[in-house]
Image (cartoon, grey):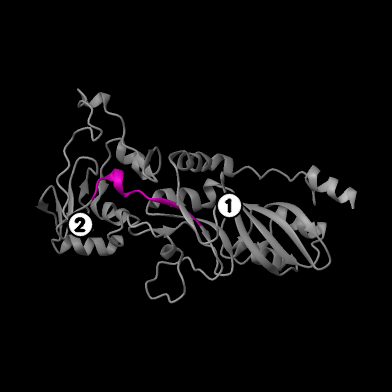
Amino acid sequence: MTGRRPSRRRSNSSGSAPRSSSRSRRPRTVQAGGIAAEGSSARREAQGGLVRLNKFLADYGVASRRACDELIAAGKVLVDDAIVTELGTKIDPIRQKVTVDGFVLPGQEDRRRYYLLNKPKGVVCTNDRLETRPRAVDLITDLDAGRIYTIGRLDEESRGLILLTNDGEFAQRIAHPRYGVPKTYRVVVQGMVEDESLQKIREGVHLSEGKTSGARVVVVRRSRVRSTALVTLREGMNREIRRIFARVGHKVLDLTREEIGPLVLRGLREGKWRKLSREEVEALLSLSDEEAARNPLPEPAGDGARSPRRRARRRRR
């Protein structure tokens, strides 16, 4: 926070002529790496809906909702320069100015953040300030990030793609299994995985939380020493892949998340991050479909299927 920001007026920030009526006003949209994008909780706000003041503050990253309620009750929050102390107050996030402890919060177009991180091993997905291990949120060095958090988790020993945001509804749409956003992992396990074990994983394995919904599994390589497979899931139980393979008698030696929906690991070095584009946010939201999530994942083309180039190399040996 670098200082007080002047009040926002109802004008077109791009400098074009004001619109003549509210009917011609285009909906506000959520920010994706600095580019406006349709989707998430901003869609509801853009359609003229009111939101609770504590939710507005929490989404911006001021504090948790409960802590925001305490700030409101203490008279530290102003709406349009008037102190608000009543809990449950609703505001229009587009038209009204909100001030906390003398700082005017930036408008909606400045507060949505979406990042993609290639998480290394040894990094944890927590926002606990007392955590002594490296945290994923600490790798996002964007000074404008504010209070962000990971969407779901990768355990400390796993690596690969993970999303971070300050948009709670977007996080829910991407992480919750009922919306079915697929995530693909490259899994290296000890020993040779037999076809019978692969079929069990595809049909679903019983864990303490219940039976898994099944996975798409494509074997990349198998030997007596170790096997490598690409596993695609729509759900995200705690350490699910490690536990699934343990149930069929194989220890996971290495686990890398390579895809989240249309997002791929290629081009993003370990420990590095980037902002999501407008198109990427829209693509992720379009994939979060409850009806599609009820359909089984497509069956793999075949176990151990190799690309034509790889098959040709093998024939030449």
Question: Looking at the rendering, which quadrant does residue 307 occupy?
Answer: top right
Which residue, given by chain and number where applicable, does mark 1 sit on? 265
Q: At numbered mark 2, what does the secondary structure look like: helix, strand or loop?
A: loop
Residue 209 lies left or right of residue 301; in this view the side is left
Residue 253 lies left or right of residue 126; in this view the side is right
What number is the disc on residue 231?
Answer: none
Q: Which span of residues is magenta-colored?
A: 106-117
Density class for disc 1 (Cα within 10 Å; few <14, some 14-19, many ≥20) is some
Q: Nearer the viewer, residue 207 or 216?
A: 216
Density class for disc 2 (Cα within 10 Å; few <14, some 14-19, many ≥20) is some
Please say whether residue 131 is one of the residues in the magenta stretch: no
Q: Nearer the viewer, residue 297 or 89?
A: 297
Residue 204 lies left or right of residue 50; in this view the side is right
Q: Position of residue 246 (x, y in %)?
A: 70, 68
Q: Residue furthest front?
A: 316
Q: Position of residue 211 (x, y in %)?
A: 64, 59
Tell which tag, 2 or 1, sits nearer the viewer. 1
Tag 1: residue type? Leu
Relative height, residue 235 to residue 277 (above, below): below
Q: Position of residue 46 (x, y in %)?
A: 31, 37
Gap in angstroms between the C-alphas marked 2 and 1 = 44 Å
Mark before the other along the chain sequence, 2 or 1: 2
Tag 2: residue type? Leu
Is residue 214 visible from the viewing direction of this image? no
Which residue, given by chain and number where applicable, does mark 2 sit on? 87
Residue 91 lies left or right of residue 147; in this view the side is left
Q: Kindly indicate whether the residue at mark 1 contacts the one at mark 2 (C-beta within 8 angstroms).
A: no
Q: At numbered mark 1, what does the secondary structure look like: helix, strand or loop?
A: loop
